[in-house]
Image: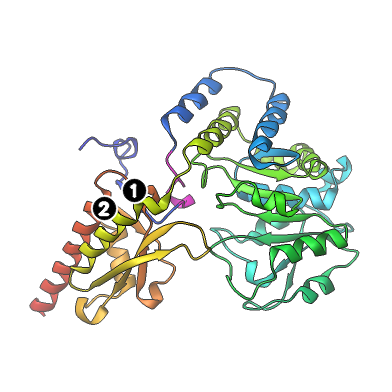
Amino acid sequence: MRMNIYQRLGLKRVINASGKMTILGVSSVAAEVMQATAEAAASFVEIDELVDRVGQLISQHTGAEDSYVTSCASAGIAIAAAAAVTRGEPDLVAQLPDSQGLANQIVMLRGHNIDYGAPITTAIRLGGGKVIEVGQSNLSYRWQLEKAISSDTAALLYVKSHHCVQKGMVALKDFVEVAQNHHLPLIVDAAAEEDLRAYVAAGASMVIYSGAKALDAPTSGFITGQEQWIRHCKAQHNGIARAMKVGKENMVGLVMAMERYQTHQPDWAQQLPELKQVAQKISAIAGFQADIEQDEAGRAIYRIRVTVDASQLRLNAVEVEELLRTGEVAIYTRHYFLHQGVFSFDPRGLKNDDFALIVARLQEISQLSGAQHAAN
């Protein structure tokens, strides 16, 4: 089998069955998108004009008044927070991340205070924001959101992510109403979401997306929303956003990927027959039982959930996951529920013979476990 570029650099082959994960490079980029990035990289352009034009093109796909391209979704959180704190005032833009004396509080639910590889609070603090948590980890009420607002409040933040608590949280429509009633901007972190219009249409002021996740773009992100707030985001280019600038080639790549996304939106339900076949093969392996699950955040994404029978396999799910990840070919799973004896295979990043290799590796682990048990 022909080695990929990373193997030629001396790194092991990786099978990404964990989803759109930053630690694995997020996604693979289509050839026509890469061709556009190469063409953009070879030419010069007035960057400010490109930023404005890319924002206009993005907005055609989101229904927003304007948009601002960022280096990633995490940068988008920091920049949106900075926009809320500074209102685009040049002296305040230059003052950040020191926001002492400013209305700098960003109000969010405790159940939305996540770590996506870094604490979301870190990105907010980079933008001069001070996090004010509302509610408990598993339950929150609108009145708590209302009560948390003061003269020091800069914005409300709503996070849509599989990392978040999925029940008992204040609804988006309540966030919109509370923000509007108090004349505050509402920031929505929708980094991995695939619906590019829903949150803008719902009334959010600034909505943050990852270009690399849903759109399979080169590393990038964008903030889309109301013109005044996007203008304040753009002002951060002379402040904290300077350290987060995105190259011209990735701006063009994002636009090309977004255009491609409109005509190549995947229907993950079409994978169900294949997923069921693979699940049957896995269930036939001693020590494993597999079925199909839908994404916990409600997206139309389907995965193979594998339950480890530790008593039969003589290995628990944590040990199996480590064996998969540290093998000659590194197989990464979705492993948020290992403590429950469960991990999942996300098919979105899989290619060609990846499923066959996964099944073969599970068979090998099962046989190895049996051999070790027999030897003992």
Residue 24 drawn in magenta: yes
Residue type at mark 1 is Leu
Residue type at mark 2 is Phe
Mark sitting on residue 355:
2
Which structural element holds mark 2?
A: helix
Q: Residue at 72%, 42% (x, y): give it.
A: 64
Q: Residue at 43%, 34% (x, y): give it.
A: 30
Q: Is residue 79 left or right of residue 4?
A: right
Q: Look at mark 1 in the image and give the residue it sits on.
A: 350
The N terminus lies in which quarter of the figure?
top left
Task: Give x and y (percent) for residue 61.
Answer: 63, 38
Label 2 to label 1, Cα distance in Å?
A: 7 Å
Task: Give x and y (percent) for residue 198.
Answer: 65, 51
Does the CB distance between marks 2 and 1 fall below 8 Å?
yes
Q: Residue at 71%, 50% (x, y): give it.
A: 201
**Dot 2 alpha-carbon crowd within 10 angstroms: few under 14, some 14 to 19, many 20 or more:** some
Task: Give x and y (percent) for residue 151.
Answer: 91, 64
Taking the view exactly as shown, the residue that stands out farthest to the top is 43
Q: In the rendered view, would you say 18 is above or below 250?
A: below
Taking the view exactly as shown, the residue that stands out farthest to the left is 375
Q: Main secondary structure of the magenta part?
A: loop
Residue 143 drawn in magenta: no
* Residue 218 visible in this rendered orientation of the protein: no
Who comes first in sequence, dot 2 or dot 1? 1
Q: In the rendered view, would you say 265 is above or below 103?
A: above
What is the magenta range? 20-28
Q: In the rendered view, would you say 28 is above or below 291?
A: above
Taking the view exactly as shown, the residue that stands out farthest to the bottom is 311
Which structural element holds mark 1?
A: loop
The C terminus lies in which quarter of the figure?
bottom left
